[in-house]
Each structure stands twice: as structure tokens, then as C-alpha cells.
Amino acid sequence: MRNWIRFLLKALLVTLLLVGFSAHSLVGQDGASQKSQRIYVCNQGEATLSVIDVESNEIVDDIDLQELGFSANAKPHHTVSEPDGSYWYVTLIGANSVLKFNRDNELVGQAKMEVPGLLVLHPTRDQLIVGRSMSAVNPPQSIGIINRSDMTVQKEVPTFFARPHALTITPNGKWTYIASLAENQILSLNNETEETELTTIDGKNHVFVDFAISPDGNTMVVTGQISSKLLFFDISNSESPKLTGSIDVNAQPWHPVFSSDGKNVYFGNKEAHTITVVDMESRSVDTVVEGNGLAQPHGSAISADGKYLYISNNNRKGTFDSKDTSASGDPNGTITVINTETNEIEKVIEVGAYPSGIGTNARW
């Protein structure tokens, strides 16, 4: 009998130890699951960053860049994260820097680069690809390649055209696409050979804002700020994107994002204070989302389960009546959380002044 009791006690002890180990391995210092998806928000108007937890749709951290030694004019612009959330990266237009944060939102590295803009991660190499800011008066005609592990600038690749801005990479990592704000040109960069191919689109200048590529890697879309169009490209021949059509959308379409199944594309319309949902099968506007919280929509991100769309809103015109003014004295901006099944706004999260680009750790 005593042996049996002794056996039960040992079994109970082992079980408790295993449970404790499992809990410790899954829970970080902030008590959240290490696999929690986060939305990283650039508050460009006040040099802060907001971190939103997707599970709760609440702000879980605020990062003041001035406390880290940067000026009030640092202008954080865009973010991107490692797929496992271990590190994330931010461009600072005003500080000519690209920052690297760890999962606990601690600054662990930085690189110097003139007026950095949009960011993309190479899916298989230790590379962070960096564009140039739209707001820069005369940015360099090049993009930067940074080694993510040690944040050293590896090289700058010429684009041969003025004002490079829109930026993306194919899912297999073989090709990077860069577009000009100044003219209807797209540069295809072979990431293995570094050979380039220039594609020119006829007609008036669209002012290409940003790209998105379908999950299967065969279709690319780009938004035209001035033309108020969404353009479709066949990139099955990756070297030479082929324009296959375009549709009219609301004024100033901004950052597009595909749904995980590739059936829809979402983007904000900055001048119209709306969100456009495009049906990719019919290549037509499915829904236009309107409502409280939409005020100069800018960045976009999708939750890993595809349930929620997150849109940042600049609110520089005070279209949204924020509860408080930001540290800079300007009205707070918002993150609108849209249910992708109903295309309705479920929540409005107030952040800092002039939220611009947003990013998230990729689906697992």
C-alpha cells in the first residue's frame, strides 16, 4: 500500500512539473503567449510605437522613442516582423535609421539609412529590404539591403528612376519589385543574380503607393494614389510583370493586403475615409466599408486566422473625434478592427498621433 501511495505521489509530482514547464515555455515575461500575434503601429506624429495584441485587440505596450534617445521628429513610418515574432523592425524617416526590436519590445539593434520608407523581409535569407520615404524631397534612387542578424547595411541597389516607394517580394524570395512615385515604372530585381528589368506602364502617372502579392505568387496588385485605381499584374513570368487590367476605386487607395486564401484584397482610401474590399475572382469592388474610426486610412494587416482586418488611420484632419490629444498636441489616430466575414467595424482602438505603417508577425 505504501509503495502504491509513493507511486501516486511521484506521478503527481511529475505531472505538476510538466504542467509548470509547459506554461513557462508558452508564456513570456508579459504573461502573454509567445505565439500571440501582435500588430505593430507607427505613430509618426509623436515618435511613439503602439503594440496591439490580436487575441484581446488591446494595446499591450507603448514605446516612446524619445526615451530611447531619438528626437520628437524621428517619424516612425513602417514596420515588419519576423514570422515567429522573435524580432520586428521599424523605419525612422526623421532619424535616418532602421530599428530592430525583440519580442519583449526592447531595442536590440539599428542601422543608418537615408529617409527609409517601406520594409519587406526576405523569406529565406538574412535580409531586410528597405525602400525610401514618400515624404522625402529628393530621396536616393536606390533601395537598401540590411543583414537582419547584425543590422549592417549590406548594399544599396540602384533603381534608375526617381522616388522609389512601393516595395514587395515574391513568396519564394526570388524577385523584388520596386515602383516609382514620379513615373509609371516598376523595377524587377532578381535577388540571386541582381539583374534588373524595367517595366513602363503607358498613360498618366498613377503615383504607385504600394504592392501586394497573392499567396500563390502569380498575381500582384498596386494602388494608384492620383489615378484612384487598383492595377492587376500577372507575375507568373516574374521578370516582366504584365498589366492585365485595372478598376476604379475611391480616392487615394493606400496599402493593399491579400486575404490568406487570395480571394480578396483590402485597402484604405485615404481621401475618402473608406475601406475597399475587392473580389479577386471577378476583379470588382465587393464592398466599401464606412464608419466611425475611419479617418485617412493608411496601413493594413490581417490576423493569422483571417478573421480581422486592421487599418491604421492618420486622422490628421480630425475626422475622428478622439477622446484625447496626443503628446504632440495633435488628435489621436486610430486602428479600426474590421470583421472580414461581415465587413463591419468591430472596434476602434485609439493610438498616438498620425499612425502610418503597421506590420505584424506572419501566419504560422
Image: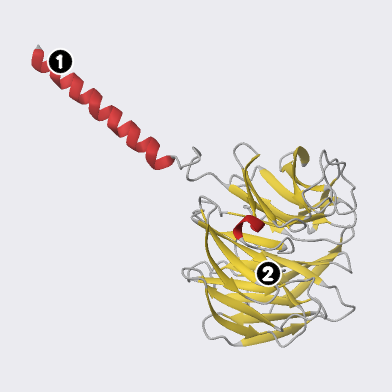
Comparing 32 with 1, the one in front is 32
Residue 57 in view? yes
Near mark 1 (Cα within 10 A), the count class, few <14, some 14-19 or many ≥20, is few
Q: Is residue 233 above or below residue 159?
A: above
Q: Nearer the viewer, mark 2 or mark 1?
A: 2
Near mark 2 (Cα within 10 A), the count class, few <14, some 14-19 or many ≥20, is some
Name the amino acid type tagged 1.
Ile
Residue 51: x and y, percent?
63, 48
For marks 2 and 1 on the same chain, the one whose residue lies earlier in the sequence: 1
Q: Is residue 332 left or right of residue 105?
A: right
Q: State the separation of the CA atoms marked 2 and 1.
A: 66 Å
What is the tally of numbered marks visible in this picture?
Answer: 2
Tag 1 residue: 5
Residue 10: x and y, percent?
18, 24
Image disc number at residue 173: none
Q: Is residue 57 above or below residue 261?
A: above
Q: Is residue 287 above or below residue 23?
A: below
Comparing 238 with 128, the one in front is 128
Q: Is residue 340 left or right of residue 184?
A: left
Residue 37: x and y, percent?
56, 46
Q: Image quadrant of residue 14? A: top left
Callout 2–callout 1 Cβ contact below 8 Å: no
Q: Image quadrant of residue 235? A: bottom right
Query: Which residue is located at x 68 percent, y 77 percent?
Result: 114
Q: Is residue 184 left or right of residue 56?
A: right
User: Which residue occupies the extreme top position in the image?
Assistant: 1
Q: Image quadrant of residue 115? A: bottom right
The local secondary structure at tag 2 comes to loop
Name the amino acid type tagged 2.
Ala
Tag 2 residue: 95
Residue 312: x and y, percent?
75, 51
